[in-house]
Amino acid sequence: MKIGFIGLGNMGAPMAANLVAAGHEVTGFDLVARPEGITMAESAPAAAKGAEVVITMLPNGQILRSVAAEVIPAMDAGAVLCDCSTVDVDSARAVAETAEKAGLGALDAPVSGGVGGAAAGSLTFMVGGGDAAFATVKPLFDIMGQKAVHCGGPGAGQAAKICNNMILGVTMIATCEAFALADKLGLDRARMFDVVSTSSGYSWTMNAYCPAPGVGPKSPADNDYKPGFAAELMLKDLRLSQQAAEASDADTPMGQLAATLYARFVEEEDGKGRDFSAMLPRFEKRHRG
Ligand code: NAD
């Protein structure tokens, strides 16, 4: 397939490399990055011209909107614009509407799995958009990832992503504060893990990504909290969840509090650049009140 790939940063570069390795003809564009092994175009529209699928992997919704405004007029009718960035639901829907008006297919397909998943081709795609566009891009999702869930119409992929990550942020905080309480009560962390991981308090954050070093399976906690999934990326996703909650009049008090705590952690404490599970050493140092 002829593919345009715009945004070749930490995630985009390995995703594009996997498409090249599978034999697809990829033309890339990035304002800054020049990854090896990918043919680069002079501009975003030049990368999009003649492509059957244009994939974008960009920092935020505002940048997505401006890139989409440039590339949509350059794309052939019937081609598909597939955005894999994590952006606000409104931007995803606005871009899909513009693309569809121009006779293109459009998908929002944010991912989970991080840089490791992008390199290994084991991402999970959460996809919003039409059936035909999904069918066109599905073989590419199968190369870049292990699973692609068609969640519904435009914006449904972003909705699934921010709901999932809102649960993840809230659950990580709950797991970390429980470990900090266990410490104060003199309860051994390994015993706490043994009980909770097989009891009703279990979760992915406890069982698969335990924030306590030396406890449970290997996780960023065992690597001095190097990400993994950086706290500032969790903050981005929590803020998107609260923006969406605001716009749709949804009551999300736990999500709101998680966004506040991660904002404090990233912007006022030492959380920036650390894994989001480094909330545990944060709570360890704190006192009530
Ligand atoms: P990144 O900053 O490494 O890459 C973004 C790239 O976009 C950069 O290379 C930048 O130069 C390029 N760019 C910015 N504006 C551009 C423009 N106008 N035209 C062309 N290129 C432009 O970010 P990343 O870590 O690769 O993340 C990309 C997206 O994936 C984000 O939306 C992020 O939230 C999401 N995501 C990241 C992770 C992760 O672990 N890194 C996990 C899941 C989802």
Image (cartoon, grey):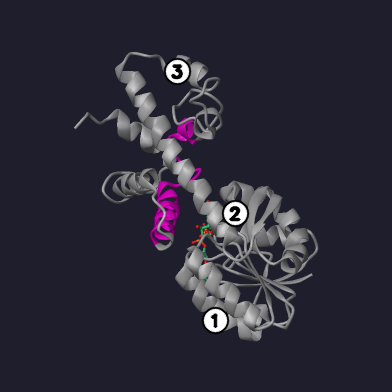
User: Where in the figure is residue 238, as x and y percent of width and height?
Assistant: 42, 51
User: In the picture provided, is 24 more to the left or to the right than 55?
Assistant: right
Identify which residue, 175 or 113, lies in the foreground: 175
User: In the picture provided, is 225 more to the left or to the right than 12?
Assistant: left
- Which amino acid type is marked by label 1? Ala
Whether disc 1's CB lies below 8 Å from ligand 1 is answered: no
Residue pointed to by mark 3? 192
Disc number placed over residue 111 in the picture, else none: 2
User: Where in the figure is residue 39, as x and y percent of width and height?
Assistant: 68, 72
User: Where in the figure is residue 278, as x and y percent of width and height?
Assistant: 39, 37
Which region is colored magenta?
A: 220-246
Residue pointed to by mark 1? 69
Q: Earlier in the sequence, mark 3 or mark 1?
A: 1
- Classify 113 as above or below 98: above
Give the secondary structure at mark 3.
helix
Instruction: Report whether residue 275 is seen.
Output: no
> Dot 2, crowdedness within 10 Å: few (<14), some or many (≥20)?
many
- Classify 52 as above or below 58: below
Question: Residue 222 colored magenta?
Answer: yes
- Which amino acid type is marked by label 3? Met
Estimate the spatial distance between the alpha carbons at disc 2 and disc 1, rounded to whole Å.
23 Å
Q: Earlier in the sequence, mark 2 or mark 1?
A: 1
Q: Verify CB contact (< 8 Å) between mark 2 and mark 1.
A: no
Whether disc 2's CB lies below 8 Å from ligand 1 is answered: yes
What residue is rendered at 43% in x and 34% in y? 224
Instruction: Report whether residue 223 is seen.
Output: yes
Give the secondary structure at mark 2.
strand
The N terminus: image quadrant: bottom right
Count of numbered circles in the view: 3
